[in-house]
Amino acid sequence: MTYQGVLTKMASEFLDPIQYYLVFETDFINVNQLLDKTITLAFVEYQCLNCGLNKPIYRQGFCKSCFFDVPQAADWVMRPELSKAHLGKEDRDLAFEKKAQLQPHIVYLANSSNVKVGVTRKSQVPTRWIDQGAHEAIEIVEVPNRYLAGITEVALKEHISDKTNWRTMLKNDIKDEDLVVWRDRLKPYIPNEALAYVIESNTETLLQFPVSQYPEKPKSLNLEKSKHYTGKLVGIKGQYLIFEDNTVFNVRGNEGLVVAISVNV
C-alpha cells in the first residue's frame, strides 16, 4: 500500500503511548500502525505550504519568497518577545498577529534532552511538549499574550537552557528531573510584568512515546538528496521517525516535501 502527500508536522493524540498521524489532503496515516513494519519513503517534489508551487523549500515548509512574506514565518514566531500586536503595531499582517498573539500563552519547563524553558499557546499544551520529545513538562506561567510570555522566557533563559539537543533526545540519554523544584528555583527571575500570572501549584505532565528501540548514533535522513529510503520503523518521538538502522527522519523539518510512503509486506 502506498500513500502520497505533502508533509506537515505530525498531528498527535495525548494517549499512553502517544498516537501520531500524518495528515494528507485526502488521506491520513496512523503512524503507530506502521511500527515494526518496513516502509519506503520516496521524494516526489516540493509543494510550498503557502503558494503550493513546486519550488525548493527554504524554511518551515515555505519557499524562499513566501518565507519572507507570510506572517506565519515572521521573527516573532521564533522570538515571542518581538510580538507587537498588544500595541496594535503590525509586523506583516495585524489581523493574523492579533489572533495568534492576543491569546493565553504558557511559559513552561520541559525535559527532553535537558530541562529547558519554552513558550507556547495554551491551546497547544501538551502538543508542543510532544513535538519536542519531552518525557516530562510543567507549566510555570500563564499570561494573556505572547509578548509577556516572550519576555518571561528571555529572563529565564539567562538561568536555564532554551534549546533541545535532538540527538540526546532521540537516544533517550536523559534523566528524570523534579520540575517542581526547578519551577520554584526559577521563580525569583520571572519579570515583574508577569509575576501576577505565576502558576503557584501544579504537577508534572508525563509523556510516553511509542519507541521499542532508541538509536545509539542517530543519523539524519536527507530525503531530498537520497530521493528514497527503506527501513524498519521502530519508534516515533518528537517529530522524528526512528528506524532500526539508527536512521531518523524529522517530519517537521521536511514540511513542504511531497513524499510517497509505501508499506512493504
Image (cartoon, rainbow, N blue to C red):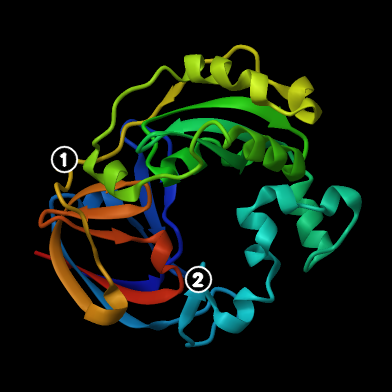
Question: Residue 175's x, y, as percent?
Answer: 29, 26
Left or right of residue 40: residue 156:
right
Give the class, few, some or many, for how many residues have Cα within 10 Å of label 2's Cα (few <14, many ≥20).
Answer: many
Work out whether residue 27 can be spotted. no
| Residue type for callout 1 | Ser
From the viewer's perspective, is residue 27 above or below residue 123? below
Q: Is label 2 in a helix, a strand or a loop?
A: loop
Numbered marks: total: 2
Q: Is label 1 in a helix, a strand or a loop?
A: loop
From the viewer's perspective, is residue 120 above or below residue 176? below
From the viewer's perspective, is residue 146 above or below residue 159? below
Q: Earlier in the sequence, mark 1 or mark 2?
A: 2
Question: Which quadrant is home to the C terminus?
Answer: bottom left
The answer to which of 21 and 91 lies nearer the viewer is 91
Dividing the picture into quadrants, the one containing residue 90 is bottom right
Give the residue at mark 1.
212
Question: Which quadrant is home to the N terminus?
Answer: bottom left
Q: Distance between the residues labelled 1 and 2?
A: 30 Å
The answer to which of 199 and 25 lies nearer the viewer is 199
Dividing the picture into quadrants, the one containing residue 186 is top right
| Residue type for callout 2 | Gly
Left or right of residue 175: residue 133:
right
Question: Residue 147's x, y, as percent?
Answer: 75, 44
Give the residue at mark 2.
61
Question: Measuring 42% from the left and 41% from the top, which residue is drawn there?
Answer: 130
Question: Measuring 26% from the left and 40% from the top, which residue is drawn there?
Answer: 210
Left or right of residue 112: residue 75:
right
The answer to which of 248 and 18 lies nearer the viewer is 248
Question: Residue 157's x, y, as percent?
Answer: 57, 37
